[in-house]
Image (cartoon, rainbow, N blue to C red):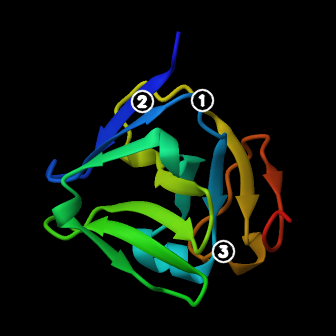
């Protein structure tokens, strides 16, 4: 049986569906992700060919760096996607999915850049000072 996961932005203008298994959650603590979300960016990912997006006319992309784009709803501002240039996969914010998601925390990245107003939870996930490569 094929795994199907659905989700949407806060206002529902942008919705999506994924087919197949999702990667464990990556929590990114870099300054860009903190500025976008207010805490840290918790996302899973799938290959772009297993993602269907509805309401793409309301999906806007912001180039926060020379290497990737961040997709968000132009109506309500919900952060939804992150995609590295040329990548076959796309990251999707875990909080945008309908529950249950069934995917646990896998890794914390850019821990050396985390905000001073929170502690990284003891959740058993690997931690890296930068990226996980």
Choose the circle earlier in sequence order: 2 or 3. Answer: 2
* Residue 124 image position (x, y, % from top left): 79, 40
Choose the circle earlier in sequence order: 1 or 2. Answer: 2
Q: CA distance from mark 1 to mark 2?
A: 9 Å
- Residue 110, quarter of picture: bottom right
Of badges 3 and 1, the one in the foreground is: 1
Residue drawn at 66 percent across, 40 percent down:
24
Horizontally, residue 58 falls left or right of residue 128, namely: left
- The numbered mark at residue 3 is none
Residue drawn at 78 percent across, 70 percent down:
131
Q: CA distance from mark 3 to mark 1?
A: 29 Å
Q: Residues within 10 Å of mark 1 (few under 14, many from 20)?
A: some
Instruction: Locate the C terminus by quadrant.
Output: bottom right
Q: CA distance from mark 2 to mark 3?
A: 30 Å
Q: Residues within 10 Å of mark 2 (few under 14, many from 20)?
A: some
Q: Which residue is mark 1?
A: 21
Q: Nearer the viewer, residue 122 or 9?
A: 9
Choose the circle earlier in sequence order: 3 or 1. Answer: 1
Horizontally, residue 35 falls left or right of residue 119, namely: left
Of badges 2 and 3, the one in the foreground is: 2
Are dots 1 and 2 in contact, CB under 8 Å? no
* Residue 96 image position (x, y, % from top left): 36, 46
Q: Which residue is mark 3?
A: 114
* Residue 104 sits above or below residue 111 on the image: above
* Residue 29 sits above or below residue 4 on the image: below
* Residue 125 image position (x, y, % from top left): 78, 45
- In the orientation shown, which residue stands out farthest toward the bottom? 66
Q: Residues within 10 Å of mark 3 (few under 14, many from 20)?
A: many
* Residue 28 image position (x, y, % from top left): 63, 65
Q: Which residue is mark 2?
A: 5
* Residue 99 sits above or below residue 121 on the image: above
């Amino acid at each position: 049986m094929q795994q199907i996961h659905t989700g949407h932005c806060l206002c529902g203008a942008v919705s999506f569906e994924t087919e197949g298994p999702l990667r464990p959650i990556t929590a990114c603590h870099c300054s860009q992700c903190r500025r976008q979300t207010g805490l840290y960016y918790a996302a899973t990912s799938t290959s772009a060919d297993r993602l269907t997006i509805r309401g793409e006319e309301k999906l806007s992309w912001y180039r926060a760096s020379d290497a990737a784009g961040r997709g968000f709803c132009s109506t309500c501002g919900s952060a939804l996607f992150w995609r590295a240039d040329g990548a076959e996969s796309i990251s999707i914010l875990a909080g945008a999915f309908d529950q249950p998601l069934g995917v646990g925390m896998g890794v914390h990245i850019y821990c050396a850049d985390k905000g001073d107003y929170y502690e990284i939870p003891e959740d058993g996930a690997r931690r890296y000072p930068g990226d996980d490569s």
